[in-house]
DNA sequence: TGTTCATATGAATATATGTACATATATGGA
DNA sequence: TCCATATATGTACATATATTCATATGAACA
């Protein structure tokens, strides 16, 4: 697209794009994706890592699943989640890059 | 970050990241950014292009301005807006790439 | 100065959504 | 079978937010 300013972006596609980016508009979901970027984790590990209600985590995992951003496999009673999109890290990076300049995180 | 899984993402930073991505979670804002990606436009041009209420456009432009995603200059009575972030196009591209596979836009 | 045009903004409203609580489902073991 | 553990899900509620309407601001010009 950066090579082709005539690329057509339909209105329907804009709604789908917005839905996709909704996955990243919440700090909890970002923390989940970041945690899974480090290593795959089961739900209770995420609950401990983020120090949040198990129900809240499960609800957010469902959101991410429905957008195919995370996948999981069952291992006995536990569900092991991992990232399911190679772009996630790059997207987060670009966001970080942007707010670096704006919010001043360079000093750390 | 994709090279360094030990990169530390603080909780505060996650909130800032979420705030940044909120800019992309709405179809109107995506349409505005996409329009400005083609060429700079004044508010009334955007109103015509998106066929939306002038107030709605102005409100969304303010949101995008506050995140430094668009900039504008005054020319007499009109305000000419343009993109103010080199990552916008790439971010949209990656979103498109993702939903291409998921929602099936490849046939166009 | 008064009028028109372009844009911005405050308030109100409707809708979307994140979280907690309660409960359901499913697996493994005694 | 009974119980404990892990996870999922329906509901309710509080909060966030996109849009519209009304109005304000400010520039150009008669």
Image (spheres, coloured by chain):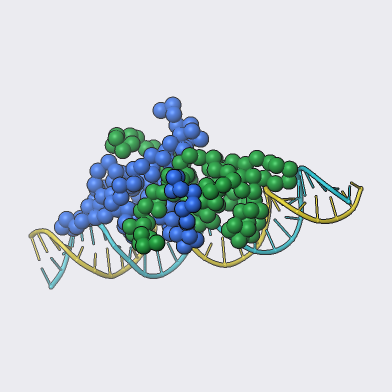
Chain colours: A green, B blue, C cyan, D yellow
Q: Quadrant of residue B62?
A: bottom left
Residue A15 in the image: x percent, y percent?
44, 43
Query: Could you tell me which quadrant the C terminus of chain A lies in?
Result: bottom left
Q: Can residue A49 be seen by looking at this rendering?
A: yes
The answer to whether residue C29 is above or below residue B15 is above
The residue lying toward the viewer, choosing from C27 and C7, is C27
Q: Is residue B21 left or right of residue A56?
A: left
Q: Is residue B10 left or right of residue A56?
A: left
Which residue is depicted at the point 41% across and 49% down?
A93
The answer to whether residue A14 is above or below residue B23 is above
The residue lying toward the viewer, choosing from C14 and C25, is C25
Which residue is depicted at the point 44% across and 45% down?
B3
Which residue is depicted at the point 48% across and 60% down?
B10
Which residue is depicted at the point 19% across and 57% down?
B74
Q: Is residue A89 left or right of residue B60?
A: right
Residue A94 in the image: x percent, y percent?
39, 48
Q: Is residue A75 left or right of residue A102?
A: right
Q: Can residue B46 be seen by looking at this rendering?
A: no
Query: Could you tell me which quadrant the N terminus of chain A lies in?
Result: top left
Residue A14 in the image: x percent, y percent?
41, 42
């Amino acid at each position: 697209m950066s090579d082709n300013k005539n690329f057509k972006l339909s209105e329907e596609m804009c709604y789908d794009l917005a839905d996709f980016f909704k996955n990243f508009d919440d700090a909890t979901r970002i923390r989940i994706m970041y945690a899974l970027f480090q290593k795959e984790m089961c739900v209770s590990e995420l609950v401990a890592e983020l120090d949040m209600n198990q129900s809240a985590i499960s609800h957010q995992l469902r959101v991410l699943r429905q957008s195919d951003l995370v996948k999981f496999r069952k291992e006995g009673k536990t569900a092991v989640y991992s990232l399911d999109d190679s772009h996630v890290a790059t997207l987060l990076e670009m966001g970080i890059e942007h707010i670096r300049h704006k919010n001043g995180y360079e000093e750390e």
